[in-house]
């Protein structure tokens, strides 16, 4: 099998994966929770005390940060950077890169939707009346590119180090741009993914004012319900997911375990509304088709779709119409991770890509959590109730964000 991509350039292998997510701190833990449809949403006292209309979110469960960071590092960096550094460490341990890799051929590409906003919130609320006392690390903690740079600094990676912000499509955008650099020979290895930790009172209050969040305070575990007729908004989550990408031929030559490939991608913009998708799904559907074509495939080759599926009425409806357009009314099975994990904003696309690789290799489509009846069922084949077995095949993973940002990835099982 050729190591050259059908459209020219190198094929892009995934050889390492690390995650820190509300559904678990290893990929296998998240996959197990996904198959069980087990929501990670939980009530948070601080949101109740802040008198917000939303009292719950999805948080990363506790883990031993000292296994990854020194006490000094943990004090100096904020939670998003901590989550990302830990996920990156797991991904690099999984990849087992040779020590002789040239550092200037290894890059870091990270997406974030919120960036350092929560750290700025902490600084503003805590030091508004005494700015002279601001901690010395305030600026590095609030820089959106700080988490990505922390990875490069910690591991000595001297290739391009870039941060992307395309709202909820940020993680997928970072993976696509990293894969592009490897395909065209700009990098040999990329550490790529996404991160966000935005469960703060100001951020939660802002999204609540937009009526974007579910207010199912009496039953948080039932709140995130993508495509369900009774959905009322998304559930905020936090987390980080990192993938190590490298040239497939070099991965094979060194005997690396290949989790799969980033076979194709595309990015478009609805150019319609700053916070709402285009109802007809025309531009998003075009993005899906371009990603499939970029992979050298036809829509008939796609085994299933990992939907963006936020659990908002306009978002899910527009995505269902986009899928219907892309697949000419012949939808493959569709799942949606956010029913379990909540919405990780900039990390969502990266986590969902990692899970799509597992599902592609195992030929399993997880059920959509909390899905009963759906007004979109006549457009798309929604998997619910139990996992569905399919033949191992490429997966289309969708990410859509405010501003009309669309990023679609095609993840293929190991060659």
Image: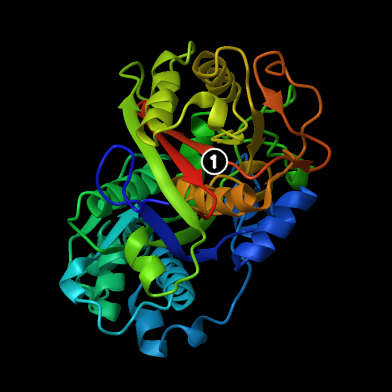
Hey, which quadrant is residue 383 in on the image? top right
- The residue pinned by badge 1 equals 394
**Residue 116 in the image: x percent, y percent?**
32, 57
Examine the rendering and report whether any part of residue 78 can be seen: no
Q: Is residue 130 left or right of residue 315?
A: left
Indicate the quadrant where residue 387 lies.
Answer: top right
Q: Measured from the top left, where is residue 354 in percent x and y?
A: 52, 54
Q: Is residue 264 above or below residue 179?
A: above
Q: What residue appears at the point 49 percent right and 13 percent down from the top-left corner?
A: 279
Vertical placement of 156 versus 182: above or below?
below
Q: Which secondary structure, mark 1? A: loop
Which residue is at the front of the view, 350 or 313? 350
Q: Callout 1: few (<14), some (14-19), or many (20+) C-alpha neighbours within 10 Å?
A: many
- The colour scheme used here is rainbow
Q: Residue visible at 56% across and 25% down?
A: 300
Pick whichever, 44 or 398, lies toward us.
Answer: 398
Q: Is residue 269 left or right of residue 412?
A: left
Q: Position of residue 329 (x, y in %)?
A: 61, 12
């Amino acid at each position: 099998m050729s190591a050259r991509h059908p459209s020219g350039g190198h094929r892009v292998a995934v050889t390492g994966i690390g995650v820190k997510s509300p559904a678990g701190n290893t990929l296998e833990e998240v996959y197990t929770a996904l198959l069980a449809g087990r929501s990670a949403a939980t009530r948070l006292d601080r949101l109740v005390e802040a008198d917000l209309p939303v009292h719950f979110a999805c948080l990363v469960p506790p883990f031993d940060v000292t296994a990854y960071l020194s006490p000094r590092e943990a004090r100096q960096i904020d939670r998003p950077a901590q989550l990302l550094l830990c996920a990156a460490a797991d991904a690099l341990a999984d990849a087992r890169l040779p020590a002789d890799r040239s550092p200037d051929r290894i890059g870091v590409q990270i997406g974030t939707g919120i960036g350092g906003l929560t750290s700025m919130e902490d600084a503003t609320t805590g030091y508004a009346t005494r700015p002279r006392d601001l901690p010395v690390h305030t600026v590095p903690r609030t820089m959106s590119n700080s988490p990505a740079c922390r990875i490069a600094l910690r591991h000595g990676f001297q290739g391009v180090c870039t941060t992307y912000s395309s709202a909820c499509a940020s993680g997928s955008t970072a993976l696509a741009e990293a894969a592009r650099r490897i395909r065209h020979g700009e990098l040999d290895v990329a550490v790529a993914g996404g991160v966000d930790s935005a469960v703060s009172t100001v951020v939660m209050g802002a999204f609540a004012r937009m009526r974007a969040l579910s207010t199912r305070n009496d039953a948080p575990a039932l709140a995130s319900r993508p495509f369900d007729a009774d959905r009322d908004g998304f559930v905020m989550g936090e987390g980080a997911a990192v993938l190590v990408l490298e040239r497939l031929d070099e991965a094979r030559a060194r005997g690396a375990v290949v989790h799969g490939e980033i076979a194709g991608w595309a990015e478009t913009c609805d150019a319609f509304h700053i916070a709402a998708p285009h109802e007809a799904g025309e531009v998003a559907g075009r993005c899906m088709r371009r990603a499939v074509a970029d992979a050298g495939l036809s829509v008939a080759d796609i085994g299933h779709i990992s939907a963006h599926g936020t659990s908002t009425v306009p978002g899910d409806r527009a995505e269902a119409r986009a899928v219907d357009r892309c697949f000419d009314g012949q939808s493959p099975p569709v799942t949606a991770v956010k029913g379990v994990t909540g919405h990780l904003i900039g990390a969502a696309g990266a986590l969902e890509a990692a899970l799509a690789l597992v599902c592609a290799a195992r030929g399993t489509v997880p059920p959509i959590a909390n899905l009963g009846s759906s007004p979109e069922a006549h457009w798309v084949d929604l998997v619910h109730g139990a996992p569905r077995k399919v033949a191992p095949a490429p997966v289309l993973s969708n990410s859509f964000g405010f501003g009309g940002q669309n990023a679609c990835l095609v993840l293929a099982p190991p060659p």
